[in-house]
Amino acid sequence: MANPFFRFFSRTSSSEAPPDAAGADVGSRRSSGLGELNRLLKGSEGLAILDLGPTSPANITHFTELGHRVYNEDVLLGSQNAEYKLKSDNGQPSVDVDRFFKENLVFRNVKFDAVLCWDIPDYLAEPLVKPMIERIASVMNPKGYLLSFFHTKDAGPDAPYVRYHISGADTLRLQRGPNFRLQRVFNNRHIENLFHDYASLKFFLARDNVREVLVVR
């Protein structure tokens, strides 16, 4: 069964990207991690870019105009499918991890050079976080890059989920997304453990209670 949350875009097909979903703009932010990623990718062409957030025409245009191929899969929205919901022995909600990864993040005949993970690990159900990072590692090219954001404890549990739209080399436009709730806050050690199979990490400090991480596969 085809995954409805997975899409592919190239320079010739980027005009077919769907319009932005409803959601109020809530400002913009400078992203040092995005700026570094764009600098590292500069001069290359024909790379495979994976965006794990909601489909963003701006992100598609940004990379396809540089001659790259963009693959998009809205992992967080896909994880909300009721078919993946289970109840554990103590009655608490759980997730059918095996079924989720049989039907999601399945990529054949493609390896990615860069992955936009955004802040998905902060909102994703706990049982899916580590397996997701491991799955992504398995479909990345050596020396590929992954950009991810993590909220700090000062963000608070009600930190709103936003969509990230690239509006410049190091600038993002923020748009209010679905009412997903922040599930956890990772400290630096947790983040390092999460990416322990990757070659290196670089942290970037931000002023809006978010830390950015650029990871090298």
Image (cartoon, helix red, strand yellow):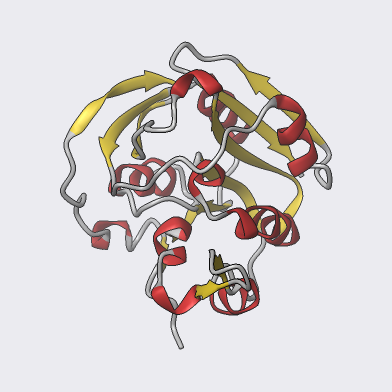
Q: Is residue 113 above or below residue 162?
A: below
In the current view of this chain or complex, which residue is farthest to the bottom?
1
Report x, y in % for residue 9: 40, 61
In the current view of this chain or complex, which residue is farthest to the top?
207
Q: Residue at x 56, y 73 (%)?
A: 100
In the current view of this chain or complex, which residue is farthest to the front?
90
Q: Residue at x 80, y 43 (%)?
A: 198
Along the line of sight, the residue nearer the viewer: 30 or 69: 30
Q: Is residue 116 above or below residue 89?
A: above
Q: Residue at x 68, y 27 (%)?
A: 187
Left or right of 109: which side holds 7? left
Q: Residue at x 44, y 83 (%)?
A: 2
Report x, y in % for residue 87: 54, 73
Left or right of 131: which side holds 1? left
Residue 80 lies in quadrant: bottom left
Report x, y in % for residue 177: 28, 44
Q: Is residue 38 above or below residue 96?
A: above
What count of labels does the image hold?
Answer: 0
Residue 186 lies in quadrant: top right
Along the line of sight, the residue nearer the viewer: 1 or 144: 1
Left or right of 74: which side holds 200? right
Residue 24 lies in quadrant: top left
Report x, y in % for residue 61: 34, 46
Along the line of sight, the residue nearer the viewer: 121 or 18: 121
Residue 165 in view, yes or no: yes
Q: Is residue 35 above or below residue 15?
A: above
Residue 43 in view, yes or no: no
Assign the C terminus to one quadrant of the image: top right
